[in-house]
């Protein structure tokens, strides 16, 4: 159960990032969309893809799941308040007995 909740939180956080990217791109401040903005957009979309692949690895119970999700959760802790909940829940799940029992 905790694995599905953690995976859902990763998907929701990735979707929230994609929504934020869409809002920034649709704003008027990006009329001059130069190479620097394109690189930032591509990097942001790749980070969102990391969150989606992390959620997929949790659901599939992959052997490399903790290698991807633990650093991603630690990085996510810095994004207060939503990222703190997402990262904190995964880290609690990972380092508690619930991870070993799933």
Image (cartoon, rainbow, N blue to C red):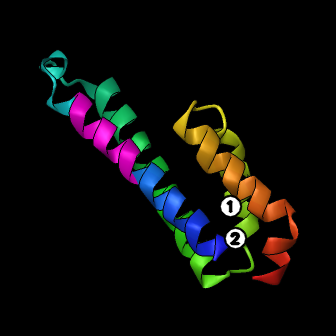
Q: Residue at the far front: name it.
A: 1
Position above or below: 50 against 16: below
Camera-side residue: 49 or 76?
76
Please give the name of the residue rendered at 61% of the width and 44% of the height, measured from the top-left corner: 85
The numbered disc on residue 68 is: 1
Circle 2 sits on which residue?
A: 65
> Quadrant of the image for the N terminus?
bottom right
Q: Along the horizontal axis of the image, is 40 left or right of 77?
A: left
Magenta range = 15-24
Q: Along the horizontal axis of the image, is 72 left or right of 63?
A: left
Dot 2: few (<14), some (14–19), or many (≥20) neighbours within 10 Å? Answer: some
> Quadrant of the image for the C terminus?
bottom right
Residue 60 drawn at (x, y percent): 60, 83
Residue 26 drawn at (x, y percent): 15, 31
Please give the name of the residue rendered at 29% of the width and 34% of the height, measured from the top-left corner: 38
Name the secondary structure under disc 1: helix
Position above or below: 60 against 89: below
Please give the name of the residue rendered at 29% of the width and 43% of the height, measured from the top-left corner: 19
Residue 89 drawn at (x, y percent): 68, 54
The numbered disc on residue 77 is: none
Which of the 4 image quadrants contains residue 90?
A: bottom right
Q: Do callouts 2 and 1 mark residues in contact (Cβ within 8 Å)?
A: yes
Q: Along the horizontal axis of the image, is 17 left or right of 6?
A: left
Name the secondary structure under disc 2: helix
Camera-side residue: 81 or 11?
81
Please give the name of the residue rendered at 80% of the width and 73% of the height, measured from the top-left corner: 98
* Dominant secondary structure, magenta: helix
Dot 1: few (<14), some (14–19), or many (≥20) neighbours within 10 Å? Answer: some
């Amino acid at each position: 159960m905790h694995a599905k909740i953690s995976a859902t939180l990763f998907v929701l956080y990735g979707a929230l990032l994609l929504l934020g990217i869409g809002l920034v791109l649709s704003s008027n401040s990006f009329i001059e969309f130069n190479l620097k903005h394109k690189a930032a957009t591509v990097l942001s979309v790749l980070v969102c893809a990391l969150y989606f692949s992390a959620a997929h690895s949790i659901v599939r119970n992959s052997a490399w799941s903790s290698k991807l999700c633990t650093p991603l959760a630690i990085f996510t802790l810095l994004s207060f308040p939503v990222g703190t909940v997402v990262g904190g829940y995964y880290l609690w799940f990972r380092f508690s007995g619930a991870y070993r029992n799933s």
